[in-house]
Image (tube, rainbow, N blue to C red):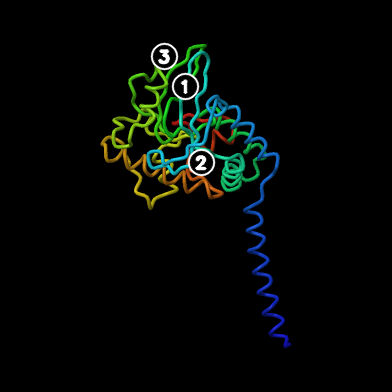
């Protein structure tokens, strides 16, 4: 074997080892983070209810990606179909975004996990009622694809039967007449323009003032979240973090207009 051959082989080995190292780092995940994510998801009032896997396609969401949950929030009974995000997946999304956008901030993971609870009760509601409780009063809050939608019972404490909640949970994307809250997406209430920074190629609607634009946004959300289940990055999270660097570095969960 010649000197040139040895040099070439050494260079090839070095390149291979480098990429293997990158792959190993991409897969690295601490057991503590996975456990923290698991406990966070279990604290969700919706996910801690009586949940069963959805075994057939639900409004274009594939079977076995959702859980149908009947739960209680205070004295109110709710029904919601939620995306079945595993603890390992949620932990990896947060680790990846923290590494890319808040490198060196040791508390980043805990902060983002806390905001996951504060912004969405750690649930991505594909369809149904994400009941909220404020000052001891429960309020109905219906969602589609992780986004609050306009529904007559919203903001009211009146009892809605599970049968009616089921009907509202199954509203097709084309029939959603309004998206209160600017179309912000769970888990972190990521606004369309915040996500668009990470996904310029998707043509995210700048406004949600027509049926076609609302339907396109809801479809983008569905496709993006399904893709994110198999990836280390969730672009809704990274876009949201990119929009609020000051507040997050200060340890706060930002509102929509906070820096």
Q: How many marks?
A: 3
Is 121 placed above or below 91 here? Answer: above
Q: CA distance from mark 1 to mark 2?
A: 27 Å
Does the residue at mark 3 contact the one at mark 2 (Cβ under 8 Å)?
Answer: no
Q: CA distance from mark 3 to mark 2?
A: 34 Å
Where does residue 73 sit, x and y in percent of width and height? 52, 18
Where does residue 83 sit, x and y in percent of width and height? 49, 37
Q: Name the residue that disc number 1 marks.
A: 78
Closer to us: mark 3 or mark 2? 3
Q: Secondary structure at mark 2?
A: helix
Of the residues under marks 1 and 3, which one precedes in the sequence?
1
- Please give left or right for residue 216 compared with residue 238 in the image: left
Q: Name the residue that disc number 3 marks.
A: 159
Residue 33 picture quarter: top right
- Residue, x 50% and y 15% (percent of image)? 134
Mark 3 surroundings within 10 Å by alpha-carbon count, few (fewer than 14), some (14 through 19), many (20 or more): some
- Residue, x 41% and y 32% (percent of image)? 127
Q: Secondary structure at mark 1?
A: strand
Q: Secondary structure at mark 3?
A: loop
Q: Residue furthest bottom?
A: 2
Q: Is residue 188 visible?
A: no
Where does residue 246 sit, x and y in percent of width and height? 54, 36
User: Closer to the camera, 88 or 55?
Assistant: 55
Q: Residue furthest front?
A: 55
Of the residues under marks 3 and 2, which one precedes in the sequence?
3
Q: CA distance from mark 1 to mark 3?
A: 9 Å
Is 240 placed above or below 4 here? Answer: above
Of the residues under marks 1 and 2, which one precedes in the sequence?
1
Mark 2 surroundings within 10 Å by alpha-carbon count, few (fewer than 14), some (14 through 19), many (20 or more): many
Q: Name the residue that disc number 2 marks.
A: 237
Closer to us: mark 1 or mark 2? 1
């Amino acid at each position: 074997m010649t000197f040139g051959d040895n040099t070439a082989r050494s260079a090839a080995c070095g390149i291979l080892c480098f990429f293997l190292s990158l792959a190993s780092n991409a897969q690295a995940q601490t057991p503590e983070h996975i456990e923290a994510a698991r406990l966070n998801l279990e604290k969700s009032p919706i996910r801690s209810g009586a949940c069963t896997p959805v075994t057939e396609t639900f409004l274009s969401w594939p079977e076995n990606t959702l859980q149908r949950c009947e739960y209680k929030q205070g004295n109110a009974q709710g029904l919601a179909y939620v995306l079945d995000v595993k603890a390992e997946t949620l932990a990896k999304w947060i680790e990846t975004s923290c590494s890319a956008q808040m490198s060196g901030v040791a508390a980043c993971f805990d902060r983002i996990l806390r905001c996951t609870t504060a912004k969405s009760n750690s649930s991505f509601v594909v369809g149904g009622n994400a009941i909220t409780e404020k000052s001891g009063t429960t309020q109905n809050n219906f969602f589609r694809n992780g986004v609050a939608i306009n529904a007559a019972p919203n903001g009211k404490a009146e009892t809605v039967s599970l049968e009616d909640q089921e009907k509202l949970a199954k509203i097709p994307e084309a029939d959603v007449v309004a998206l209160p809250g600017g179309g912000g997406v769970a888990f972190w209430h990521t606004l369309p323009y915040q996500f668009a920074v990470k996904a310029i190629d998707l043509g995210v609607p700048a406004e949600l003032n027509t049926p076609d634009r609302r339907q396109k946004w809801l479809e983008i959300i569905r496709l993006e979240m399904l893709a994110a289940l198999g990836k280390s990055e969730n672009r809704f999270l990274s876009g949201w973090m990119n929009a609020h660097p000051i507040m997050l570095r200060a340890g706060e969960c930002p509102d929509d207009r906070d820096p």
